[in-house]
Each structure stands twice: as C-alpha cells, then as structure tokens.
Amino acid sequence: MKGLAALIALLLLLPLSAGLQEEELEGLNIYFGNLHSHTSHSDGEGTPEEAFAFAMNAGLDFYAITDHAEQISDEEWINTGEAADAFYAPGSFVTMRGFEWTSPFTGHINVWGTEDFTSAVRTPRLEGIYKWIDEHNALAQFNHPGRESGPFVGDFDGLAFDGIAIDNMVSIETGNKGTGNNDGGYYKYYPLALQNGWISGPANNWDNHDLKSNPHRTAIIASELTREGLYDALAQKRFYSTDDSNMRVIFRCNGGWMGSEVYGDKLNFEVVIEDDEPIMRLEILNERGEVVMWMETESTHVEWRPEIETQGGAYYLRVFEMDTNGDEPDAPEGMQVAVTAPVWVR
C-alpha cells in the first residue's frame, strides 16, 4: 500500500516554472527569524540594542529577546522593551520582547506579548505558569524539550496536556541552537505533543547567548511584517521550522493553511516548495510521527498534490533537502530539514 501511495504521489509531482507566486501565497508572506535569544541582561552577550542591531544586519525579518526571567530586574525588562520599540520598523524588521521561564525541574518556556513578566521563583510550578500565561493572554513556547540533565529531563512532565493553556502554547522547538530537525533530538517531542492534545506548531530558534547566527530559522506566514501580524500568525499556528535559512514552504489541506482545522474524510493536500538547493524528499506524517505518504525528487521547485482518506487526527509536512551550499557542514547525511505545523482534521 505504501508503494502504491508513493507511485501516486510521483505522478502528482510537477515542476514549477517560477518562484512562489502571489496567488499561491493568497496575499500572505513568509518571514524568517528567531524567537529565542539572550543578552547581557541575563546570561548572554551584548545589550538589547546591540542584539537587535546584530539581528537586523544579519538579514532577519524578526527577532525576539527572551532573557531568563530569574536573572533580570524590572529595570532591565523595561530597557529591553525600550530597545525593542526603538528598533521596531514595521514592514522591514520586527522586534519582540519576551522572557524565558526557566525551571530546572520541568523545562523552559518562552513567553511573548506581555507587559510584565514572571519567573520560576515567583511562579515555580508548571500548572502555575500555564495559568499565568492564560491570564495574561500570552503566546508561549515549549523550549528545547528534554534537554535538561540530571534526574529532571525538562520535558514538561512528559508534555502532559493542560487545557487551561491550549490556546497559548502555540509552539514547540524542534530545533534549538545547533541542533536542528536533521538531528532529531528535539523533533521527537513534536509528535508527542500532538498526540497529547497540544495545538502547537514547530519552531527552530538560535537560543543564542552571543551575537552569532546559524542557518536555522522559524518561518512565519503572515499578512504583514508587524508585531500584530506575526503574533496573529503564531496564534493561528501558521509557521514552520526550517534548518535552511530561506526555504519557502506552502502546506495547505482542503483549502486551509498549516495550523488550520479542516473537515472531511478525504484530504486534498497542496504542497509547494522553493529553495536554491535540491529538495530530495517530501513526507506527510500523522500526529504519531508516522509517514503516510512520501515523494522522492531532486528539484529546487516542487509542487505536489496528494490525496488521502482519513478518520481524523493531525497531519504535517516534512521536507528534506541537500545542503549543497554548505551552510551546515555537520548536517547529518548532508541534509537540512523543514517541518510544518499540522492541519487538524475534525
């Protein structure tokens, strides 16, 4: 059956004669940036002003400073907000102020879009930070799940579901620092989160404590390059995690973008990929991380429209490309990988 699915998918593979067209993006744009970084206000390098200037000069569309809340003062929080406002250039460069709730026991959580902050000292329990995030109508992210050492692995109690924060925990890192989707160290927690009921999409962030970059990006598909536009897209889970700095991905199902709820027992997917390196393999996976359909190719522009029957669940796209540009010399098997937010079938 899997061989038949691959054959059908192969017949549906068509080359694109040009890049992503405006009508294909339906009036939206793809923006690349970093949602997780630190400055000298906590345990990083450089002031917020220096960090935003670095990110802007690095060509990012957006950049969030998320210092460890346990290490910052109220004055430093205000200073980061002032720096964010000073460098904010709607339509060109979006700055965000957030914080990282840093529990050595249950894990680290990034929080964006709030006027104040809390810490693991003030709010030590996982259920407490979920409640705080919900009460402040914040957007939040599970950071580097399972990374912590010792008796506590930092996997958020096995990513146990908590309905109070279901609308707030929009993201989970499948890539962090130099560990990308191609490594799989954090990616494995993504299907676990989906299985447990979280309505989250994948992110790939630098978590940088210095003024250095790497090719990993979170790509947000938004109506405009403003804080409001990006926050809305994050809330809609219209984003993806990519090891490559500029891979452009469209993933829709039954007319709905990644992050949408879709309906029906037959799913019609629309996949369009564009990059300057050869795309080698496309996969559609379910919430258990099982590949249900795949395609092998070797093209920089790919269009794919597979169909499957389903009884519900979540489905997302994974893309493998060859790193012919040498952006990531240590990439496993020379591959860079992108992972999208799913569609949820109701």
Image (tube, rainbow, N blue to C red):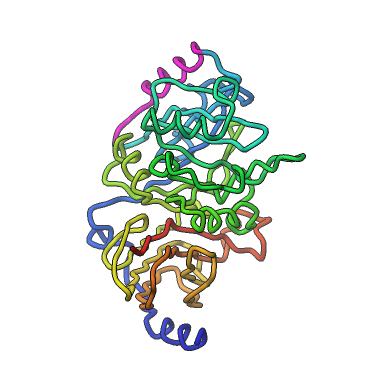
The residue sitting at 77% across, 39% down in the picture is 150
Q: Is residue 271 above or below residue 12?
A: above
Q: Is residue 204 magenta?
A: no
Up/down of 137 relative to 316, above or below:
above
Q: Residue 205's spot in the image, x, y percent? A: 53, 43
Task: Check the image and name the residue furthest to the top.
Answer: 75
Residue located 45% across and 64% down the image: 317
The x and y percentages for residue 214 are 58, 45
- State the residue at coordinates (32%, 74%): 265
Residue at 45% across, 28% down:
132
Q: In the rendered structure, does residue 89 fall within the stretch colored magenta? A: yes
Question: Of 55 and 104, which appears nearest the observer?
Answer: 104
Q: Is residue 278 left or right of residue 309?
A: right
Residue 61 or 195: which is nearer the viewer?
195
* Residue 190 figure quarter: bottom right
Q: Quadrant of residue 11?
A: bottom left
SS assignment for the magenta stretch, majority: helix
Q: Residue furthest right?
A: 150
Q: Is residue 165 left or right of residue 229?
A: right
Pick whichever, 345 or 188, lies toward us. Answer: 345
Quadrant containing the C terminus is bottom left
Residue 7 appears at what percent x and percent y? 46, 87
The vertical placement of 264 against 28, above or below, is: below
x, y percentage for residue 291?
52, 72
Q: How many marks on residues? A: 0
Boundaries of the magenta span: 74-90
